[in-house]
Image (cartoon, rainbow, N blue to C red):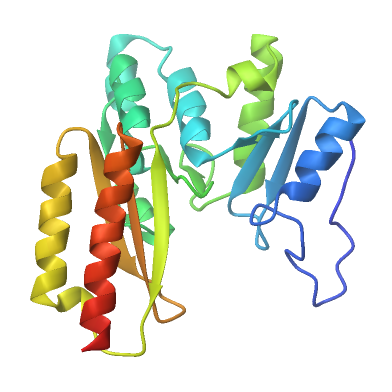
Amino acid sequence: MIAIGVEPNGTNINDRCGSTAPALLQETVVASGADIGVALDGDADRLIVVDEKGSIVDGDQIMALIGGELGTAGAAERRRRRRDGDVEPRLERFLEGEGLRLERTKVGDRYVLERMKAGGFNVGGEQSGHMILSDHATTGDGTLAALQLLAELVRAGRPASELLHQFDPVPQLLKNVRFAGGKPLDAPAVQAAIAVGETMLDGRGRLLIRASGTEPVIRVMAEGDDAGEVEQVVDMICDAVRAAAAN
């Protein structure tokens, strides 16, 4: 095992390392010939994985593997092991193909956990790599999720690049719009643009639009089967937000 980014000095948490900056991990995995790399965030409640080729594996692929592995039990067990979280369409289609039910929540691990508790669900997560495995813990635990992945890697006897590529992700685009004040998302023109975008992506993708909780930024994300359409939708909504913020 090769450890990197493990010399804290009180000010260097996530400094060019960890799940938010995985470039060093990618380089180290390839240079050392490692089978897999795991990066945690500052409080270790989420993870991002790097396969042996240096490619990043996000939370959607991790949920697909864990969900699919748990779903290898019988039909009754599959129905019990329902999923909850913020996911993209290809993951949803993959889980449906495995006979697994999926539910969505608002972005944020608190909402995922609340829904898991209410519904008795045992696997929750987000694309950011935040994983909650309620059979083993009551909160997000990146180390626990990593151990689950490593156990499956050993059991399957397949390289990480194969095992952790459960489905082909759809095109996704995220843009941030900074604003000076007010609530641009409440503007009628912005709501109208969002409605048009939802109609354009209906059945072929989804929209996720929210205000940042830490800075004056509106995050506009869209994903779908058509990359050009995704970009068109994101740009249209961003333009509407900028116009509303300027008024």
Q: How many marks?
A: 0
Q: Residue at x 12, y 67 (%)?
A: 191
The N terminus lies in quadrant? top right
Vertical comparison of 91 with 119: above or below: above
Residue 118 visible in image:
no
Q: Position of residue 159 (x, y in %)?
A: 70, 16
Q: Residue 16 versus residue 48: which sits nearer the camera?
A: 16
Vertical comparison of 69 with 120: above or below: above
Q: Position of residue 114 (x, y in %)?
A: 32, 55
Residue 162 visible in image:
yes
Q: Residue at x 45, y 80 (%)?
A: 215
Task: State left or right for residue 8 relative to residue 240.
Answer: right
Task: State left or right for residue 185 relative to residue 95.
Answer: left
Q: Residue 23 versus residue 18: which sits nearer the camera?
A: 23
Q: Quadrant of residue 209?
A: bottom left
Vertical comparison of 221 with 64: above or below: below
Q: Position of residue 57 (x, y in %)?
A: 59, 35
Q: Residue 19 versus residue 71: which sits nearer the camera?
A: 19
Task: State left or right for residue 123 relative to residue 66.
Answer: left
Q: Residue at x 40, y 49 (%)?
A: 173
Q: Quadrant of residue 201?
A: top left
Q: Quadrant of residue 234?
A: bottom left
Q: Residue at x 27, y 68 (%)?
A: 239
The C terminus lies in quadrant? bottom left
Q: Residue 62 versus residue 239: which sits nearer the camera?
A: 239
Q: Position of residue 246 (x, y in %)?
A: 26, 86
Task: State left or right for residue 121 relative to residue 215.
Answer: left
